[in-house]
Image (cartoon, rainbow, N blue to C red):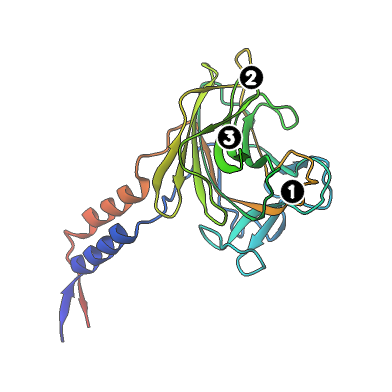
Amino acid sequence: MKKIPLIFGLASVLMVASIYGAPVVLPEANLFSTSFEEPDYLPGTVYGQNGWTRSGTTVDTPGMVIEDGTGAPLSAPDGTQMLQLSNPNGQYGTGPYANLKFTEEAATDRLYFSAVTAFSGSITANTGLISRFYLNNTSDNFYGAAFGIHQQGGELRFFYLNAKNEYVSFGEALAEADTFYRFEADLDITGLSYVVRVYDYEENTLIASTDKGFFRASKAIDINYLRITNSSNYNTNGDNYVTYYDQIWISTLPIPEGSTTALLSSTLLLLIPVRRLFSI
């Protein structure tokens, strides 16, 4: 009977993880976090679940919590469910929007945000905005920070909204369809400024980041709403695309650096002294 120390098995796992990489799993946030998984979220419309509400004039394209294997070209990046917003060919109107009031006591100092998004489908040369995140102070009017993916000059770019209500592209990398990206934002609410970083989700590598951007606001504001949408343009361009969202995380505390690696390292340190043996 041959015995192998557990430490070698863990070392092998660590080596494999270092080769293939692993998406960052964020810790629980002190304001809001979700991966749209059961039992907290059931498949079907997201509106009415856990505080999500709806706005926009599109009435036949609701935000849907979808399961893997139900027709989406992508699988959820974490777990088996994610949020889908659609904007089908010829749909006339604005939105759809999914709104969430993530805190009753609005953040007034610093706010940290992270979420994963992707898009899939047909996008024409006339398409402008594709996937957007708002962090603002109401569900209807926008005053705060906004960022996401848009098309500019025929290229799919990452963008943020500046104080002049202009969509400013940043970074050299181009966004690709059927690819998950993780957006992180650090909001200085008192200073009315923010910084956005974009990561390749699978590789967990930084691919674009902004210089300091400024809120669309002239005085200090409270931030207590998240609003996401896949378009605000009248969609008469022949587009037929959907956007996906997952792993939303909002906190007044910074995102820990390298949280997944830190957790794995801590586990190893706890287990190595035990040197439990497996029999095979």
Instruction: Please tell me which residue lies in front, 201 or 171.
Output: 171
Of badges 3 and 2, the one in the foreground is 2
User: Distance from label 1 to label 2 (Cα)?
Assistant: 32 Å
Question: Element at badge 1?
Answer: loop
Q: Position of residue 257 (x, y in %)?
A: 35, 40
| Residue 220 seen from this side | yes
Residue that sits furthest to the bottom in the current view: 1
19 in relation to 238, above or below: below
Name the residue that disc number 1 marks.
Answer: 47
252 in relation to 90, above or below: above
Query: Total label count?
Result: 3
Instruction: Please tell me which residue lies in front, 32 or 95.
Output: 95
Of badges 1 and 2, the one in the foreground is 2
User: Distance from label 3 to label 1 (Cα)?
Assistant: 23 Å
142 in relation to 46, above or below: above
Q: Position of residue 108 (x, y in %)?
A: 56, 21
The disc, 3 or 2, on the residue closer to the chain's N-terminal end is 3
User: Distance from label 3 to label 2 (Cα)?
Assistant: 14 Å
Q: Position of residue 31 (x, y in %)?
A: 55, 36
For the residues bearing labels 3 and 1, Cβ distance under 8 angstroms: no
Q: Residues within 10 Å of mark 1 (few under 14, many from 20)?
A: some
| Residue 188 seen from this side | no
The disc, 1 or 2, on the residue closer to the chain's N-terminal end is 1
The disc labelled 2 sits on which kind of residue? Lys
Name the residue that disc number 3 marks.
Answer: 147
Residue 164: which numbered mark, if any? 2
Question: Element at badge 2?
Answer: loop
Q: State left or right for residue 3 relative to residue 13.
A: left
Question: Element at badge 3?
Answer: strand
Q: Position of residue 182 (x, y in %)?
A: 49, 45
